[in-house]
Image (cartoon, rainbow, N blue to C red):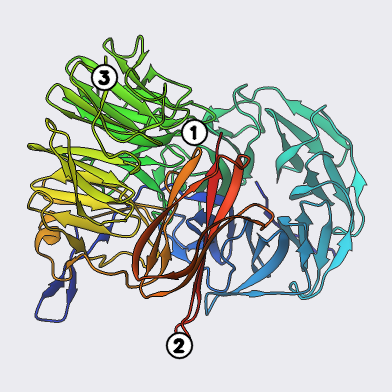
């Protein structure tokens, strides 16, 4: 009696917390439902549910049992800091392959405990499992190194076949098991993967991206906009010529009734007639990385925009996200509209005060650096990205659409306007520019600076007077009262000014050495807070001045005379801070890979737990600023106790190239500067070692951070 074999395939491809019955409340930060910019490595659907391998600040596996609309983390037992990850829901269990320190490992999920355990003997130095499949009781793993492994005992033991080319995907059609490869087209096996035969290459392109089986044929997608069918009975190939020409290099999926083809940035297409005609099913301008049919619906994983789910075969889509773990670099709030500028995916928009992020803009693939508002006009500064470039953008319809105003080849990190003039500062490759005709022409304005087109990090305007903070020695703050025709030095040389904000008759500056206050009309500055602390942003609203550091917020309600630390209640311990914005009664907080948070501004004013500025409670090596840098950068360290300190700079080979500190240092915050002008451009590492004093139980502390030197 013949048994019919089934093949399972996975391819690479505002709230208040309440405690007790008495209704006591605790003021805290609350994470909002977005923005979703998780990187999805892979998707897999099986009898255990729908699984997604993601990178969202920390890597992990997520599980959904409702068609991809809600998700729960199941990452216990997996390594963190992985380079790649694939997940496979097979009849024999749920498997995950990870690449950690350039070595491939295989894990299996214990569903009752939701814990992963390393299984079997499959450890692959320099290789990685890129595709999974199962035929009967045989589990198949295809690797990026061109090997295929088989197991008949649930993954405990493995035998090797091949080598062929790097394996991208499997498909079972007729009586043949097919393997699509990267660089070798398609191979076939008639004995569940013991031996393989090359079955030809129908196109000059030999790079397979995906395969599915339907109606006794295999549908094979190739890199560069080509799909072929393969009939194993006649060993015949046929090209589908009706696919929209824009689509290419995508992912195939089938629900048994038709074929879906998901393409990066061009959307999802569906064919109900074996590829003769195709219908567009949405998700244009979305970087789709994987697609699965599951429980009567569709789920798409993306390269930076999380997950999308559809219950109606792709006619409508809903962004379901995973965890809101994007890195928010800039925030603009206009009424109930919240604009989040992200590190990799441009602007994401919420129209309900941050509760949901469902709107994309024409900047969905840009690096967002800053926002600026001039009446009803909105401006965004971006960094160069592969699709859109950098420069400055403008919206006149509330942020729904954007048009570029110029400076495409530059990062724009700050924007300001004075009268009819619009100013834009660039930290890389540098320069301060202005336009009076909405970007038709731009003029460099550096008359009075020690050097032409220096990197610019901050701008502020007081009436018709504009202030700028170029980066580098001997820069500081410069002032112009003639719309930038000429600049005069206004102090704070060699302080690393990062942000400027005007408050009534005062001008505040955030620097690598704390917060300074001065007058817009009389030179002279006073350090009023956070001495020797790197402050990255200053924001003023509703009578509250907020200073942002990497780990803390500080607030002043008396014009900078006194400051207190804002408690971190509700924030994860490892949550680094990026930016804040205030609107009405709310303050919004953007974080590094932990998404967007908010709380009531009244809590910032009165919340129990906000404390006066004091000594660091734990050792810490803060990120150098600026980073990337050229040629100098500032490094700040926190020392909770007196101790012997070593602060060194290492190259990529681990060799010490500079020693910034070596010896006893007092408790507190210390700022040190490294001048890399004598060294080649490249990646360096700053390493802090705080040794325990003799007789102390406290262990030695070691922390390392990456620095990038650009010339």
Furthest residue to the front?
663
**Where residue 22 sits in the image (x, y, percent)?**
9, 80
Residue 122 placed where, x, y %? Answer: 77, 68
**Location of mark 1 (residue):** 281
Can you tell which quarter of the image residue 658 is in?
bottom right
- Whichever of callouts 2 and 1 sits on the residue coming sooner in the sequence is 1
Q: Among all residues in the image, which is located at the extreme bottom?
A: 695
Q: Quadrant of residue 23?
A: bottom left
Residue drawn 33% across and 29% down? 380
Q: Residues within 10 Å of mark 2 (few under 14, many from 20)?
A: few
- Label 3 crowd bin: few (<14), some (14–19), many (20+), radius 10 Å: some
Q: Which residue is mark 3?
A: 422
Q: Are marks 3 and 1 in contact (CB under 8 Å)?
A: no
In the picture, measured across the screen, residue 7 lies left or right of residue 391, that is right
The residue beneath circle 2 is 697
* Secondary-structure class at tag 2: loop
Q: Position of residue 377 (x, y in %)?
A: 22, 23
Marks 2 and 3, Cα distance to the nearest angstrom?
58 Å
Query: Which one is in front, 650 or 673?
Result: 673
Judge depth for marks 3 and 1 and give the one in front: 3
């Amino acid at each position: 009696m013949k048994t019919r074999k089934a093949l399972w395939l996975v391819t690479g491809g505002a709230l208040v917390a309440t405690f007790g019955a008495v209704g006591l409340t605790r003021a805290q930060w609350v994470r909002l439902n977005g923005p979703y910019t998780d990187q999805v490595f892979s998707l897999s659907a099986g009898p255990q549910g729908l699984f997604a391998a993601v990178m969202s600040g920390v890597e992990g596996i997520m599980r959904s049992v409702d068609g991809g609309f809600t998700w729960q983390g199941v990452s216990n037992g997996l390594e963190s800091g992985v380079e790649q990850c694939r997940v496979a829901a097979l009849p024999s269990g749920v498997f995950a392959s990870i690449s950690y320190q350039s070595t491939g490992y295989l894990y299996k999920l214990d569903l009752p405990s939701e814990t992963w355990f390393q299984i079997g003997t499959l450890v692959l130095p320099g290789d990685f499992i890129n595709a999974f499949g199962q035929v009967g009781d045989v589990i198949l793993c295809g690797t990026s190194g061109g090997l295929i492994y088989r197991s008949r005992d649930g993954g405990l033991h493995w035998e090797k076949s091949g080598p062929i080319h790097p394996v991208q995907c499997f498909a079972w059609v007729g009586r043949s098991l097919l393997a699509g490869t990267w660089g070798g087209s398609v191979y076939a096996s008639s004995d569940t993967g013991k031996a393989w035969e090359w079955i030809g290459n129908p196109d000059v392109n030999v790079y397979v991206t995906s395969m599915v089986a339907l109606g006794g044929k295999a549908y094979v997608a190739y890199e560069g906009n080509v799909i072929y069918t393969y009939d194993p009975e006649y060993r015949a190939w046929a090209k589908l010529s009706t696919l929209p020409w824009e689509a290419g290099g995508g992912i195939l999926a089938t629900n048994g009734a038709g074929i879906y083809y998901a393409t990066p940035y061009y959307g999802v297409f569906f064919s109900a007639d074996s590829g003769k005609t195709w219908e567009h099913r949405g998700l244009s301008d979305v970087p789709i990385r994987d697609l699965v049919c599951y429980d009567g619906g569709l789920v798409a994983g993306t390269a930076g925009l999380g997950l999308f789910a559809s219950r109606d075969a792709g006619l409508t889509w809903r962004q379901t996200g995973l965890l809101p773990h994007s890195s928010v670099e800039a925030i603009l709030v206009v009424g109930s509209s919240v604009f989040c500028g992200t590190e990799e995916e441009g602007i994401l928009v919420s129209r309900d005060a941050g509760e949901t992020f469902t709107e994309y803009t024409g900047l969905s693939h840009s690096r967002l650096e800053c926002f600026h508002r001039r009446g009803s006009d909105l401006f965004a500064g971006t960094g160069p990205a592969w699709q859109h470039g950098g420069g400055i953008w403008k919206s006149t319809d509330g942020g729904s659409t954007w048009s570029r105003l110029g400076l495409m080849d530059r990062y724009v990190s700050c924007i300001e306007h004075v009268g009819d003039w619009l100013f834009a500062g660039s930290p890389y490759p540098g320069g301060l520019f202005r336009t009076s005709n909405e970007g038709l022409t731009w003029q460099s304005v550096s008359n009075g600076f020690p050097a032409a087109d220096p990197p610019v990090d901050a701008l502020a305007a007081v009436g018709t007077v504009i202030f700028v903070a170029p980066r580098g020695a001997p820069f500081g703050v410069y002032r112009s009262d003639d719309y930038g025709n000429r600049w005069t030095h206004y102090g704070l040389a060699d302080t690393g000014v990062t942000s400027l904000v005007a408050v009534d008759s005062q001008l505040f500056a955030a620097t690598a050495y704390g917060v300074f206050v001065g007058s817009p009309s009389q030179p002279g500055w006073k350090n009023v807070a956070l001495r020797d602390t790197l402050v990255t942003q200053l924001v003023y609203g509703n009578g509250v001045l907020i200073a942002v550091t990497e780990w803390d917020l500080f607030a002043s309600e008396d014009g900078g005379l006194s400051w207190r630390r804002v408690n971190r209640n509700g924030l994860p311990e490892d949550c680094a801070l990026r930016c804040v914005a205030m609107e009405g009664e709310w303050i919004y907080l953007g974080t590094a890979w932990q998404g967007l948070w908010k709380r009531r501004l009244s809590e910032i004013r009165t919340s129990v737990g906000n404390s006066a500025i004091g000594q660091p409670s734990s050792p810490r090596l803060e990120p150098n600023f600026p980073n990337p840098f050229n040629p100098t950068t500032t490094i700040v360290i926190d020392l909770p106790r007196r101790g012997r300190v070593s602060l060194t700079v290492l190259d990529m080979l681990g060799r010490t190239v500079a020693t910034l500190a070596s010896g006893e240092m007092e408790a507190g915050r210390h700022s040190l500067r490294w001048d890399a002008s004598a060294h080649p451009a490249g990646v360096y590492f700053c390493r802090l070692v705080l040794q325990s004093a003799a007789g102390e139980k406290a262990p030695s502390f070691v922390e390392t951070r990456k620095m990038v030197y650009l010339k």
